Image (cartoon, rainbow, N blue to C red):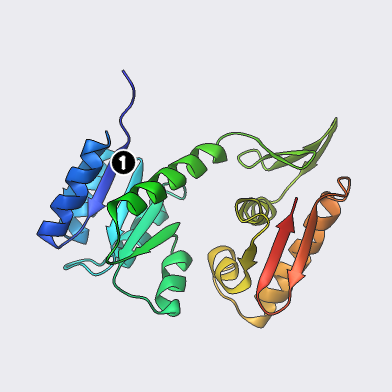
Amino acid sequence: MDHKIKILLAEDEPALGQIIKESLTTRNFDVTLCTNGEEAFQQYKTDAPDILVLDVMMPIKDGFTLAKEIRFENEHIPILFLTAKSQVKDVVEGFEIGGNDYLKKPFSMEELIVRINALLKRQKSKNEPINIGKYTFDLLKQELLFGTSKENLTHREAQLLWHLHIQRNKVLERSIILKKLWGDDDFFNARSMDVFISKLRKKLKQDANIQIINIRGFGYKMIC
């Protein structure tokens, strides 16, 4: 029997919560619905879900606070925020505390399901080596292989390369990745990130088809 993906859904609007739960259940997900952040945290500790779908504005404990507490215990579980907030600073805050994606209300159930599946696919790929041009990259082992040669990566190098890969051929925004990996997007961290980018360029130089280019004022793009 196939394993059902377990989703922990935290949504304080009863009608919306039921609609989301029923829609996901019909798609063969196993959904637990909670109506506040504290209830969701307790459920997380007993349920061991595969993915979290968290409303940002909730009573007792909001979604951002809940995500911070869960991220302290689990670095890898995918977190998708549901939010009525649309300001860039709110979106950045969500990524900064460990969110993987966000969806603005109102949204369609189809889009929610597509985003959930994308996060689950991304999570699965983290556990398997991937190809970056002629290289093989193992995120968990923090190794970069080219033929018979092997480069050991630091934790931050591996995380930065992973984010460049999942955004390949698109711009990886400097502010968002700095806050996610360095904790702050100040000048000194930005210079540190530039150094890490230079190190990755050197470690990927054996494949001329791979480029990490600087998009001035925005961030970096890995072309491969």
Horizontal relation, residue 133 to residue 218: left or right = right
Q: Can you name the residue that lies furthest to the left here?
A: 14
Kindly identify the residue that appears in the image at 50 percent across and 37 percent down.
124
Looking at the rendering, which quadrant does residue 6 occupy?
A: top left
Residue placed at 37% from the left, 56% from the top?
A: 80
Res 46 → quadrant: top left
Q: Is residue 93 among the parts visible in the rendering?
A: yes
Amino acid type indicated by mark 1: Pro
The local crowd at label 1, few if under 14, some if 14 to 19, many if 20 or more residues have their Cα within 10 Å, is some
Judging from the image, what secondary structure is the residue with disc 1 in? loop
Q: Label 1 belongs to which residue?
A: 49
Name above or below for residue 39 compared with residue 152.
Answer: below
Left or right: residue 88 compared with residue 84:
right
Q: Position of residue 141 (x, y in %)?
A: 65, 38
The residue nearer to you, when weighing 167 against 92, is 167
Quadrant in the picture for the N terminus: top left
